[in-house]
Image: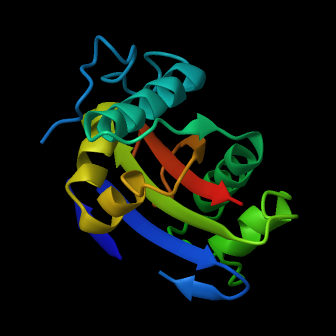
Amino acid sequence: MRLSRHHIRLSAAAALSASALALAGAPAASAASCGSASAQPGEVSKAAMASSTICLLNAERTERGLRPLKVNRRLSRAATAHADDMVRRDYFSHETLIGTSFVTRIRRTGYLSGPRAWIVGENLAWGSGDRSSPASIVRAWMHSPGHRANILQRRFREIGLGLVMGAPKQPFNPAVTYATEFGARS
């Protein structure tokens, strides 16, 4: 699913496995409680923006009685590599230009090695100007049914976030591209 509005571009996907694959208002936390939630590119570090994004996502979950997601290094590596690839090669999709799916990208990090059952999902977005802040991106995701479903999926336990300065479609600057990988393994 994709939608485009006011220089925010979103995309969400989810996958599930137990031997076989199946395609399956404002953020609750205030800018004050999530640090740099209102920051735009160049105002704070990328790490501060990432931390605020995860804080806002977890606030949405905990407000609804769901446990917060823990950051996973492998999911973050998959997310960052994909966001970087989209910005460098000017595309916006869950599949790379050669057709590699988000499940395959996550698998290549080793995240899916070992468990018999797993579930993964991915949210993508990019925003420019005042629509590039963590608060704007999370607000847009929460107003999109597919993205909201990934954020509020009870079974997800871990998250990886990749933020890359720039947009997958030029000449939008300043801009930020977000890739969020969700997962759980058993």
Q: Position of residue 62 (x, y in %)?
A: 34, 34
Residue 85 visible in the snapshot:
yes
> What quarter of the picture does the N terminus occupy?
bottom left
Identify the residue at image location x=52%, y=44%.
Answer: 166
Task: Name the spot of residue 100 as percent of width and height, x first.
Answer: 71, 79
Q: In this orientation, which residue lies closer to the viewer: 32 or 168?
A: 32
Image location of residue 17, percent across then percent down: 65, 78
Measuring from the top left, give residue 26's x and y in whole percent.
17, 36
> Above or below — where is 37 with respect to 149?
above
User: In this picture, is 41 found above or below 164?
Assistant: above
Q: Would you place residue 52 above or below residue 21 in this image?
A: above
**Residue at image location 60% in from the left, 36% down from the top:** 70
User: Along the line of sight, which residue is nearer the eye, 78 or 131?
Assistant: 78
Query: Can see residue 131?
Result: no
Classify residue 65 as left or right of residue 21.
left
Q: Quadrant of residue 138?
A: top left
